[in-house]
Amino acid sequence: MNAHASERGRRRRARAAMAAMFALLSAAAAAPPPAAAETHAVVFMYHRFGDGRFPSTNIALDQFDAHIAEIRSGGYNVRPLPEIIAAFRKREPLADRTIAITIDDAYASVYEQAWPRLRQAGLPFTLFIATDAVDRRLAGVMTWDQIRELATAGVTIGSQSASHPHMPDLTQAQNQAEIERSNQRFREELGFTPTLFAYPFGESGLEQQQLIRGAGFVAAFGQHSGVQHADTDLYNLPRFAMNERFGSLDRFRLAANALPLPVSDVTPADTVLRAQNPPAFGFTVDPRIKRLDRLNCYASNQSGAARLERLGPHRIEVRIDEAFAPGRGRINCTLPAGDGRWRWFGVQFFIPKA
């Protein structure tokens, strides 16, 4: 082999090595962050079962049966909610398509309809309870004997305060009294106090989240859509709500297969809107998430996708034209992730009445 041929061979090998290195670096840059890939979970929220009088908080029994059949068909890792929270806190990996089931308000249909189905399917779940309704023995609400039966069988019991109030409308002292009163009733009836909390109506801001953290709860949950992951605020965790309108099998599958859209520097920091409405909403997407040109955000107070402004490569500002009405307002942002899966990030705001 002459010198020129040798030199050409060396250059080819060098180019091949550089191409391989570039491909490796590109793949690493395009990979999702470890939290998004390894430690994330989808949490579902239900209320009533087979009670068509309240379609906004009810799931039809045929819909719920379809959800259970989908879960049991394989491909999902159903875990008790405390195990998922422990994995987040320790930053331990979770299997892909990890999901959890939660139920709010302890309606009688939980005991009569959901519990037999979930028990037969061997599916763990968490029941969040507002204690005053149980104490008053309201019609259509579970009894303490029924709740004890579920707790003894391994169902995780969480708190929803005592009277299920709109917490942002109360003072910190009033909310503290709510927690203390409910904790006392849990100790008296069950022998323990819950470590997980669900905000009534999913409503919270920085003050309420700080109070729940200070009260000793290890995590708290809203009612905004999104995928939980290790970098999510543990005191404002999202859940996908299931009801008659949004409980089709297609939507269940879409949510169950969703991936996190990891963001930081979310503004406004406080989701209770006492001043600027609509909010100047924005966030910074993890730089390892690509193709932000395909990102769309939707506000509950306007039709169609919201206008997005991209400030630099990773900062997104969502421009909302109309103010939210008093009560609750939501923004959902989604990004296609391939293979029919979507990244999902949502926020719920509380807008006090004037």
Image (cartoon, rainbow, N blue to C red):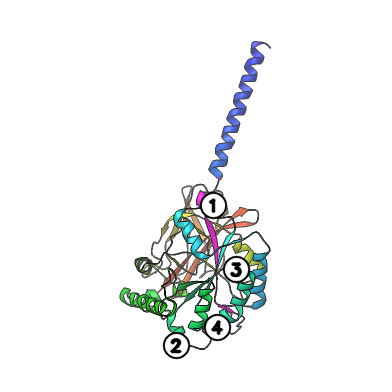
**Residue 245 locus on image (x, y percent):** 61, 74
Quadrant (top left, top right, bottom left, bottom right) of the C terminus: bottom left
Distance in Å between CA atoms under marks 4 and 3 = 19 Å
Distance in Å between CA atoms under marks 4 and 1 = 37 Å
Name the residue beneath numbered marker 2: 136
Local SS, label 2: loop
At x 50% / y 74%, what residue is drawn? 151
Seen in the picture, residue 334 relative to 151 is either above or below; the reply is above
Disc 1 crowd rating (10 Å Cα; few below 14, some 14-19, many 20+) is some
Give residue 351's quadrant in the image: bottom left
Distance in Å between CA atoms under marks 1 and 2 = 44 Å
Name the residue beneath numbered marker 3: 123
Name the residue beneath numbered marker 4: 108
Residue 19 on the magenta segment: no
Q: Nearer the viewer, mark 4 or mark 3?
A: 3
Give the total number of marks visible in the rendering.
4
Local SS, label 4: helix
Inspect the image, locate mark 4, and give the three-letter code of the amino acid beneath it.
Answer: Ala
Disc 2 crowd rating (10 Å Cα; few below 14, some 14-19, many 20+) is few
Name the residue beneath numbered marker 1: 38
Q: N-terminal of the two: label 4 or label 1?
A: 1
At x 59% / y 28%, what residue is drawn? 17
Disc 3 crowd rating (10 Å Cα; few below 14, some 14-19, many 20+) is some
